[in-house]
Structure formats: structure tokens, C-alpha cells
Amino acid sequence: MTPKQQHAFDKSAFKASMTQHLTQLGRTPETAEMRDWYLALGRALAEHTTSDLVATENDLAIKQAKSVNYLSLEFLIGRLTGNNLISMGLYDEIAAVVSEFGFGLTDLLEQERDPSLGNGGLGRLAACFMDSLAAQQYPAVGYGLHYEYGLFRQSFKDGAQQEAPDAWREPEGYPWEVVRPDLAQTVGFYGHVAVIEENGHTRREWVPSLHIQAMPWDLPIVGYQSNTVYPLRLWEGRALTPFALDAFNDGDYTRAQQAAIDAGNLTKVLYPNDNHDAGKTLRLMQQYFHSAASVGDILRRHLDAGHPLAALPDYETIQLNDTHPTIAIPELMRVLLDEHHLSWDDAWSISSQTFAYTNHTLLPEALETWSESLMANLLPRHMEIIFEINHRFLQDVAAKWPGDVRKQQVLSVIDDQGERMVRMANLCVIGSYAVNGVAALHSELVKRDLFPEFDALYPGRIQNVTNGITPRRWLKFCNPDLSALISEKIGDQWPAHLEQLEQIAQYADDKAFQKAFMAVKKRNKQRLADWVKTHLDITLNTDAIFDVQIKRLHEYKRQHLNLLHVISLYHRLIHEPNFDMTPRVVFFAAKAAPGYALAKSIIFAINKVAETINNDPRVGDKLKVVFIPDYRVSMAEIIIPAADVSEQISMAGKEASGTGNMKMALNGALTIGTMDGANVEIREEVGDDNIYIFGLDVEGVNALREKGYHPDHEYHQQPLLKASLDSLLDDTFTPGHPGLLRPVFDSVMASGDPYLCLADFADYVRAHNQIDSDYRDSTLWAHKAILNTALVGKFSSDRSIRDYVTNIWQLKAVKR
Ligand code: Z57
């Protein structure tokens, strides 16, 4: 592993720099502990990335080129040190330096806390996209929030999820970030709209009653084998100093005081909901704070580069990662109208050629709406602008469909059935030049089911860009042995050209390659088994099938369907004397949103089932169930290379894409999955023989709903299903306490099984039986596993970014 280095590496200078940083930590090489060494290493490396970041920022060629601004409330970047070493081409050099100081690099890297500044797929996608933008040198800035606490840390108490704060920067600060006080912005809230008479004209201007400072922290996104470093710019909320108190409006003084206390709380914590809109005021404040600071910084860069305002769409495009930063649209309009005094038409022309929007979900409960009265109170001028956008838009609708009131109702930005609500997705579609879904199936459903009228009104606006993952973190870094094996066969250019993996397919039936490939898998399984032994004290058999479901806990993802299968295996092991199964370890890892009661009940149930099965001597090592606590990027990096089977079992139509499916396939796991999200495209790539598809597809789901679904029929007709479900009601898994697992039973019986677990159960069991028998044929399995690695090159996020660049953003790479 010796990718080309960007700078000549001066070893003795670097060692001196590390020692210097130790001194700043109050340590000497003699007294320093592992953590001090990690911090010194990070800070010494960050000196280089910061100077490359500043150089990239000042590059005239970039200022003259078009940039993408990726606006996201979440960037789930994971640890930076190891990955940046790979990008910088310094991994082996630094490993040598660290060993001269008497440490192992991998141990040192373990000292880093994950920056968990995101919930799940959406936030991780943003991180992969930043990596691919930098690798391919498409000018980009990522804009996010500098949460003091990232996603909560998870532990289990008697099987139940406990949450603890994630102080990811404490106590010494995070070595990779740099604060940029010269780039601070001020963001207003509340107040009123003043009407100003000026030489015969009246204009409207917002007078906020509260101002909060937005302080940017930059994290370096280091391009793989390029000295391009783009900023991930994260805004921190700070109360303005008392000297700015004159900005407070007298009428609103008391409320403003209260709000001032909130100022320091604004970016305290990431909201822990994935695919769910909780509608909290502080969240809307975070969204606006993020949008206003980012739009302010984008305009500053644009004007500093000497470009005219009207040329904004030629130099900047703003990608909205879901609807969370939608308020950036009326914010840009406000700045253009009220601060730069442009006409509505000129402002709208600029704005609507600048924004593009990615939709990540069809789930109704995840589609954001904000109460009109809340928004009018917090952002009075923005509410006026939204009304004006909507007013003009509804005239277009009326022109297209004269007299069709229903069309106006469904398309309006304002939902006026009940409390008046602002529909953020509608505002996004109206205010963007492009809208995209995240997998082929999902994008079709966006057009057909979510926005059919918009698709008719704006043909071609709604497009598809299939998600991807960065092969640097998700193969080269996390699976060094497989990476070395691949490079031996096809050279070392594949991390930047993942389609080259296809050349591996020719070795799918090569005995020596199969042996080497499966030996790597085995070592990765051993590494995971060692982790489990150390942290959970469970002994695992690495010959067993490692069957893995790792993702946020959500009913639509159907961890409880997986659980029912596990229970059915247990049932058969106990009750069928001749039942023979391939040994299996079923891994779960998942966080539940703290307010999501059923998700927490499912976690509790999995833990109780695991406890019972793992301690039942009748089971032996045929079946083990492991719930790995505190799932996060660094844990994924251990689990994914060890997976044999990847569970992607959402009800068809519900998982927009999935990206864990891509990571596991790339690392040689076989997918068991429904025809949902990107599973459909994975199947297209790897072929039907190398994936286990089961269950109802979207049409099947709709047909079943149409005809009427009765989960109790399934319950009564399928003895194995019935027995499995019944064991949730007695005390099989909660000795002495029957009924503790009833919420899971009720969710698929009394509550009507909204995600059709019971309808898909039989076919799911069939697919698992096929896996059980295929795995016994180790040659067959090796063949399938190799083909998965070989045939998923499409899912590199480099390809996703090129799709955005070509079909949406129209950027040119700027090579440095
Ligand atoms: C989130 O992680 C996703 C969608 C959302 O609307 C929110 Br809020 C959070 C996920 C989807 O559920 C995945 O299917 C998808 O792969 C991912 O976003 C990235 O597009």
C-alpha cells in the first residue's frame, strides 16, 4: 500500500512536530500516554491539511470555477485520522514513525472518538459524497452544524436501551478542526417586518429581536491521492457578547432575553430522529441558523471572488440534503430582495437556478411540515416570502389546470386542512431546478406516488441519482487484507476506479483465489469475534454464518421480522429432533430514537431472545445472537468486513436506497433482501444467482393492501410463525415475567402489522433455508461472495458524484 504521495515526507521534521504537540499537551515522550500520542499525531497532521485547505480556498482557478455547496444538517463522518492518512498517502510512513515512538498505529487510531454528527444513512451519505468530491476535485464546500453533542451513546441495562451524551470533543478538543473567527456570521430570529418609505418606494425589511453568532469550524476533507482539501464547515451557535444587546428590540426584550439563554443551546445537540419529523421549535431554529450562515458564507465567497450577483447560478449551486435546509430558499430570496434590492423576478431567477433538492424518503411521518404560526413568529419575513412564492406558483397551477381546486390543494406550499402547515418538500420542488431520488425504484416512486402533479407540471425536473459509498473508507481502509488481495490481482488503482473490480470476476472459480478470499473473510470474522469476546464475553464460532443486520431501528426496516426468523430457528432446534442447521451467528446493531417506544421494545426483545438462546445448552454453537451496542461508523468498520450475509429486509417501497447493503456486498457478503431501494440495482449488477431476493415487491404490497390484509390469517395458517409469535407472550425469553415482549407481538397482530412482516415471513424463511444449504457448499459460496465484490463497482460514491456533476450541477474538475 504505497499510493503516490503529495508532499515529500520529512520524517524527522514530523517527529519533531509530534514532540512539540506533546509539549503543548503538557507531556514529554516519557510521560505521554496513548491518548496524548494520538492527539499529537492528529494535530501534527492537521497542520498539513489546514494549510492545504487554506491553499485550496485561495486557489484562483477554483474561484473562477463552479462549486457545489452541500447543505446538510448531518455529516456522519466517522474518525478522520486513519482515513486522512490513506488519502494523504502517508499510512505506512506514519505507521513507521509511531512504531519508533513505541506504539502501534492501529492502537493509536482507536483513541479517536467518532464524530457522530449524523443519525444514519442520510448523514453518512453526505460524508461519502464529500470524500468523492475531494477525490475527483470537483470544487465543493460542505455546510453543517457543529453539534457539541453528536448522536447519543447507547448502552443496555437489563436489555433496555440507555442513552448517554456524546461529548465527542472532550476534554482536549478535536485535533482535526480549526475555528475560523474571521468568517463568523450573525443570524437573526423573531422580531417584526418594518415597512420603509424611501423616495417614493416602500420596501420591507426584517428587524429581528434576537441575534446569534454563527462561528465556523472547518474540518478537512482530504482528496484521495490529491492535495485538494475542501472544508466541511460546521456552524456553532454562540450568544453574542453583551455589547450587542442594543440589537435587541425593546418590545421583545423579555422574550429575547429568554431566547438569548437558548442561543448557547442552539447547536448543543443533534436531534436523534432518523426518518421522523418531531417538529420542535429548537430544531427549526437550528435549520434556519444553518441555512442563514451558509447562504451568507456562499454569497461572501461569490462576491469576494468579484462575480456579479446575477451570475450566482454560474458559480455556485446549492444542494439541499433532504428538506432540512429548505429555509435557505426564502433566505436567499430575502437577502437578494431586502439587502441587495433586486426585483422579485431577478431574485427568483437567481434562486431557482441555484437550488437543487434530494429527497431521501417517502415515509409520511418523515416529510417535514412546520406550523405556519410558529414560522411566522420565528421568521416573519421568510413567511411573507413563502406566501409570495406560493401565490405566484398557484397562478401557474391554475393556468395549467384551470378550475382544478384539488390540484391547487395538493400542490400548495400551505396545507390548510386543520392547523395551517408549511410543506417543506413542496417548497423545495417549486424552488429548485432539479429534484432527485436516491435509487432508481425510489425515484420512480417519487414521480408516481409522492409528486405526480409536480412531475406533470415540471417534466424532467425529477431525476434519479443512485446513492454510493466511498471505496476508500469502506474497502481500502476497513478491509486491508481484502484490499491487498485485490491489488495483487488487478493493481492498486481500483480505489479511485471501482469499476475495475470487475476484473476480479475472472477469479470467481479459481481455487487458489477462492481460498485466499475466504481466508481473508475468516480473519475478519475472527477480528469481530475477538471484539465480541472482549466486550460482550460471548464466544463465537467463526465457521458459522455471520448474518448481519446493522442500521437504525425502525419498523419499516423490519428487525422484528429477522427476530421472528431467529426465534423460529430456536424453536426448531428445540422441538424438531432431526433439524439440522448450518451454525449461524445473527448480529444486530441499531440505535432507536429515544422517543420511539416500539423501536425500543424491539431492541429489548432482541436482547432477551439473545440472552435465552445464548445460554441454552441445547443450542450449543448452532445459533448465537449478538446485539452490538452503540453502533457507529467505527463499529461498522469492524462488522462489515466480517459479514457473510447482509440483511436488507425493509418492506418494499419503504427504504429509499440503503447504503449498508452496498458496503456489505463490496466486502463479499451476500444480500438477503426485498425488491426495495438499491437492492433492486444490486441484483441487476450481481445477478439473480448471487443475491437472495424474497417477499412482496411494491406491486405485491399494493395488491395485498387493496384486497385487504389480515395478519391473523397468516398467524393461524403458519404453525412455525404461530409458535414463534406465541413465545413472545409466555415467559420463554423473560423467565418469570411473561408478557414483557407483548409490544412486539401486538405490533404485528393487534396493530395490523403495518409493514407486512407476517405476509413475508414464509418466503423469508425459504430464502434463509437456501442460504443455509448454499453456505455448506464452500466453493459455491466463495464463488458468490467473490462475484459480489467484483460486480458492485457501480456503487462507488465517485460514480454518484459524477452523475450529479453531469446531470445536475454541471461542474468541471479543478486539478491542483
Ligand atoms: C435518513 O437516514 C434517510 C432518509 C431520511 O429521510 C432521513 Br430524515 C434520514 C436515509 C434513507 O432511509 C435511506 O434509505 C437512504 O439510503 C439514505 O437516507 C441516504 O439516501
Image: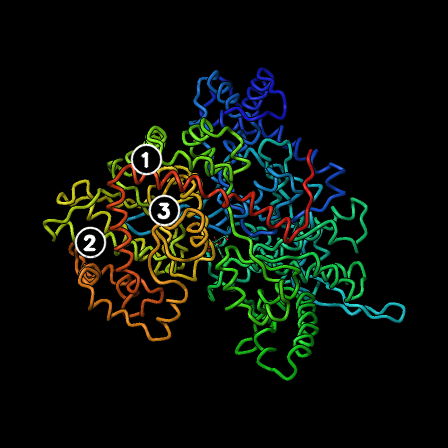
Q: How far across and down, in percent of the image, does residue 402 sit?
A: 66, 82
Disc 1 or disc 3, which is closer to the eye? 3
Q: Is residue 648 above or below residue 80?
A: below
361 left or right, relative to 814? left
Disc 3 or disc 2, which is closer to the eye? 3
Amino acid bearing label 1: Lys
Residue at horizontal 64 percent and vertical 49 percent from the top = 806
Q: How far across and down, in percent of the image, does residue 393 sit?
A: 68, 72
Q: How far across and down, in percent of the image, does residue 336 sit?
A: 76, 59
Q: Which residue is mark 1?
A: 525
Q: Secondary structure at mark 3?
A: helix
Q: Earlier in the sequence, mark 1 or mark 3?
A: 1
Amino acid bearing label 2: Phe
Number of residues whose C-alpha sits closer than 10 Å to that of mark 3, classed few (under 14), some (14–19) or many (20 or more): many
Q: Is residue 551 above or below residue 777?
A: below
Q: Is residue 603 above or below residue 798?
A: below
Q: So how many labels did they put on this image?
A: 3
Q: How far across and down, in percent of the image, does residue 609 sit?
A: 23, 51
371 left or right, relative to 731? right
Q: Is the C-beta separation of discs 2 and 1 under 8 Å?
A: no
Q: Which residue is mark 2?
A: 733
Q: CA distance from mark 1 to mark 3?
A: 21 Å
Q: Earlier in the sequence, mark 3 or mark 2?
A: 3
Amino acid bearing label 3: Asn
Q: Which residue is mark 3?
A: 690
